[in-house]
Amino acid sequence: MTDTQFKDSVIPRHVPDNPYNYTNLQLAKRTKALRDMERDYPHLPFGWLEMCYDFVENTDSESVNEIINSKKWETPGKFTNDNKKDNDNDTEKEDNDTVNDNDNDNDNNNVNDNVNDNVLVFGEN
């Protein structure tokens, strides 16, 4: 390939996504705000910070204030651990009932409880 052919074929640069059609000034403010948020909340994933910023910027202030004042953001969501724990407790109760039924069956069988008598314990002669 000659030098002129190489110069004519240009690889396009990456263009970042801009789904909210922010202007250059808005993008600069967003970048600054996200850096500040990342510094203030290092334990949160960066994607969540972006989502929060975009939500607040693209939602009218009345709606945001209504969500804050009605405390909708404080109630547990559908997939929070609190709801999951309630469902897990129900499942554990069912599992324990099954285990207890199996234990009763094993008690009736002649099972040798001293199976591990010949196991070597590390450090003993």
Image (cartoon, rainbow, N blue to C red):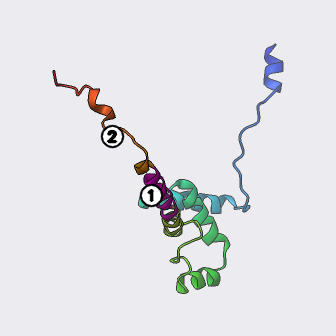
Report the residue marked by disc 1. 100
Which of the image's four quarters has the C terminus?
Answer: top left
In the shown orientation, is residue 65 left or right of residue 110? Answer: right
> Around disc 2, counting alpha carbons within 10 Å, would you say few (fewer than 14), some (14 to 19), or many (20 or more)?
few
Give the residue at mark 2. 113
Residue nearer the viewer, 22 or 78: 78
Identify the residue at image location x=53%, y=73%: 76
Pick whichever, 25 or 101, lies toward us.
101
The percent coordinates of residue 83 (x first, y second) are 53, 69
Quarter of the image with the N terminus in it: top right
Could you tell me how far apart the alpha carbons at marks 2 and 1 are, in whole angstroms?
18 Å
Callout 2 touching callout 1 (CB < 8 Å): no
Q: State the residue in front, 91 or 64.
A: 91
Q: Main secondary structure of the magenta part?
A: helix
Residue at the top extreme of this rendering: 1
x and y, in percent, of residue 116 in the image: 31, 32
Give the side of residue 16 with respect to residue 52, left or right: right
Q: Residue at x 48, y 64 (%)?
A: 93
Q: Which residues are magenta?
A: 92-105
Mark 2 or mark 1, which has the lower sequence index? 1
Q: Amino acid at mark 2?
A: Asp
Q: Residue at x 35, y 38 (%)?
A: 112
x and y percentages locating residue 38 in the rendered image:
47, 57
In the picture, measured across the screen, residue 10 lies left or right of residue 16, that is right
Left or right, 48 with reference to 43: right
Q: Secondary structure at mark 1?
A: helix
Magenta-span inclusion, residue 23: no
| Residue 58 sits in quarter | bottom right
Question: Which is nearer the eye, 102 or 71?
Answer: 102
